[in-house]
Amino acid sequence: MTMTATPVGRSTAAAGKPRRRFAALSPSWLFAAPALVVYAVVVLYPSLAGMLYAFTDWSGIGADKSFVGLANFQTLLHDEQAMDSIGNTLLLTVAIVVVQNAVGLLLALGVHAKLKSRALLRVIFFAPVVVSPVMVAFLWKYIYNPDPSAGLNGLLGVQIDWLGDPSLALWSIAATVVWQYAGYSMVIFLAGLEGVPKELHEAAMIDGASTLQRFRYVTWPLLAPALTINLMLSTIGGLKLFDQVFAATNGGPGYATETLSTVLYKQAFVFGKFGYSTAIALVLALFVAAVSLVQVYYLRGREVAQ
Amino acid sequence: MTELRDARLSRVQFFRMMGGLAVAAAATACSTKPQPTGSTGQGQASAVELRFVGVADQKAPMDELVAAYKQAKPGVTLATSFAPTDQVQTSLRTQLGAGNAPDVHVVYPGSGSAMSMDQIAGAGLLADLSDQSWTQTIPTGFKPAFQKDGKTYIYSAGSSVIGAIYNKKVFQEAGVDAPPTTWTEFLAVCDKLKKAGKTPIALGAQTPWVTQLITYALVPSTVYAKDPTFDDKQAAGQTSFAKSGWRDAMEMYLELQKRGFFNDKPNGTTFEQQISMVATGKAGMAIQVSAVLPDFRKSAGNPDDLSMFPVPGADVADQVWIPAGVVVGLGAAAKGKNLAEAKAFIDFLGKQENINRWAKAIAAIPLTQDASSTIDPAVQSFLPFTKDRAVPFMDQRWPNAEVQPVHFAVIQDLLAGKIKIDDALRKMDEAYAK
């Protein structure tokens, strides 16, 4: 069968759609079935079963637990620390989503240009992504040493308490996340850039469009699918951020960098309130799902049909 | 060029293919299954392997004592693993919750942590050790840390103290001849060190647990010296953090900061940086628990440069009390498969010679002492206090695991100037009441 035959095959399949009575038995579903079964057993079932703990007062150890209805959710509404942590989580997410994608896009545009060293630069910019987030946080703890002669302070010749100043610590953590994941956004944007047809750029050039105009009217609209993916991934990552905060500040100083994830961790494993912690986790999961759905709905709307 | 999508595969062919794969997978599974059984079945029928999970502080003494136990009882081996407190807390609580706890594991004395004796024994997950002979000699003052409802659930080799780990060389260079014995003298020493161009007190308050040590060092003098029954009264609701000498201790803490006796930006400084500052002579002292003295010594050019003295929290020398807490210990899982062997190992640790070995490895004061007991010269100056002027670490009597993290957080906020002492004490009282 040749390439030219493909559309014929597809249209035949499309025409045959109404007679398909057992969609679940189609080869595509059957191929996915083994993975879906594993996913259901390893992820779905434990997650759904775990949700039940949100309605109990289980301590995480021992057999004692009783049904408490919606009490854990009511506690959450009046929990000052959890509410503050929602604010921190949202601030972090906005900062990370905006800066990480802006930097990622700039890097992608940079390494998409005809540079001799672009392959090497791509590897360098992507390298932090493959390092464990905990290791990155520990590394940055050294870089953020408050000593004026050490780390970033020594390099910049400033005396800033990066992680110890409550008004700055959150942004310092956001910077480490951006440093680590800007390369990830870059790769996705780069894939989008590779897909922009050269002919369109040539046509725009012939029409006398400037570089900026070509970006604005040719590249940017065609990058919409990459932007959708990047915004969604960085939003989800930001909302459930845990490792970097836990390793860098453990939520401190005070409660200045506490996120919803660190609060739920502490409730479960430090305070021994597993039921309440599960309630927070459930709220977080629903919130992340809601935000992602809204985001996808709006961003898909602006994607250009190809 | 053909595309995969267009390669036709009938449903019958597909089912045949999947069926074949399933049979192949099952056959592979069956053929590999018997192998491990065969290999473990060779020779070691009577061997018992005990699993131990502990915190990093326990590695040095456990390595030594596990090796000794192997000599004493060759049939039993111990698979040990150690991790920082936070990680152990996470993994152990998960294992305890799932019912597959290690045979022997770390347990914190008293009641103030999620891994404390009181909480785990309360959930019925710790074996009763009361029939072991060493439990009969636990000093009365320490019993609340070891026992719940009169039964002993935790083994610990002794107590550690909180005081100032100081660099003798730096003190000498600054013209300080002897450690201070009153609060006024303490401030004067700090002043001398500061004038000599040194940081008087290194504080690594970015590491949460380090934040609590200065209040812990002062509260025995500001609270318990005045009312040794404070814990009972607080539990009965007759007093609170806000109404007690806790306020004085926090004021003294902040006075040290106001006078510039801490390193710059303590909230951004870690425990490791704190160690380095004292060990290298950049700072004069650090208020720390004696159990980390070996870490300071490891970092110092000459370990003998480092010693300790009690932090005087009062202006009258005999009103100075010290914190002396039972060191982190271990317990046996009540429902463990090898419970008898696990208890036998703990009984071995309870022998006087082994209490001495454990205590020596972490510069602790042995739980019970005999002629062969040695006490680290650095903590000798604390011994006169241990009889009647010492109190357990405060969290060991707190009713829940929330007070301690709140204490960490409010100290960081106080150091950052974000809250006032009133707010700090109110938050701690609220956590205590939960």
Image (cartoon, coloured by chain):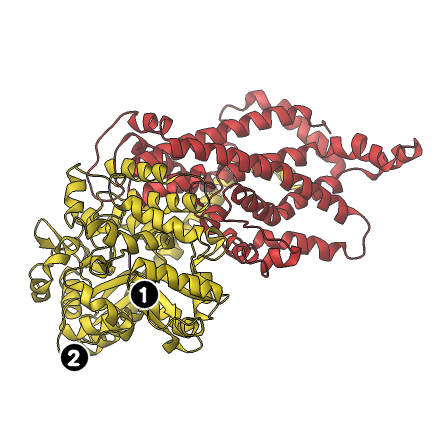
Chain colours: A red, B yellow
Q: Amino acid at mark 2?
A: Ser
Q: Please identify the quarter of the rendering in which residue A221 is found.
A: top right
| Amino acid on which disc 1 is placed | Pro
Residue B345 seen in the current view:
yes
Q: Which mark is residue B180?
A: 1
Looking at the image, residue B366 lies above or below residue A302: below
Can I make out residue B103 in this image? no
Place of residue B396 in the rendered image (x, y in percent of width and height, measured from the top left): 22, 51
Q: Tag 1's secondary structure?
A: loop
Counting from the top left corner in percent of width and height, residue B242 is at: 27, 39
Sooner in the amino-acid sequence: mark 2 or mark 1: 1
User: Observer-nearest residue: A141 or B65?
Assistant: A141
Q: Which residue is mark 2?
A: B372
Q: Nearer the viewer, residue B189 or A159?
A: B189
Camera-nearest label, 2 or 1:
1
Q: Secondary structure under badge 2?
A: loop
> In the visual, does B222 lie left or right of B189?
left
Report whether mark 2 lies on the same chain as mark 1.
Answer: yes
Quadrant in which residue B402 is drawn: top left
Picture quarter with the N terminus of chain A: top right
> What is the crowding at mark 2: few (fewer than 14 residues within 10 Å), some, or many (at least 20)?
few
3D distance between C-alphas at marks 2 and 1: 31 Å
Provide residue B47's location: percent of width, then percent of height.
21, 70
Q: Chain of mark 1?
A: B
- Relative to A279, does residue B381 appear above or below in the rendering? below
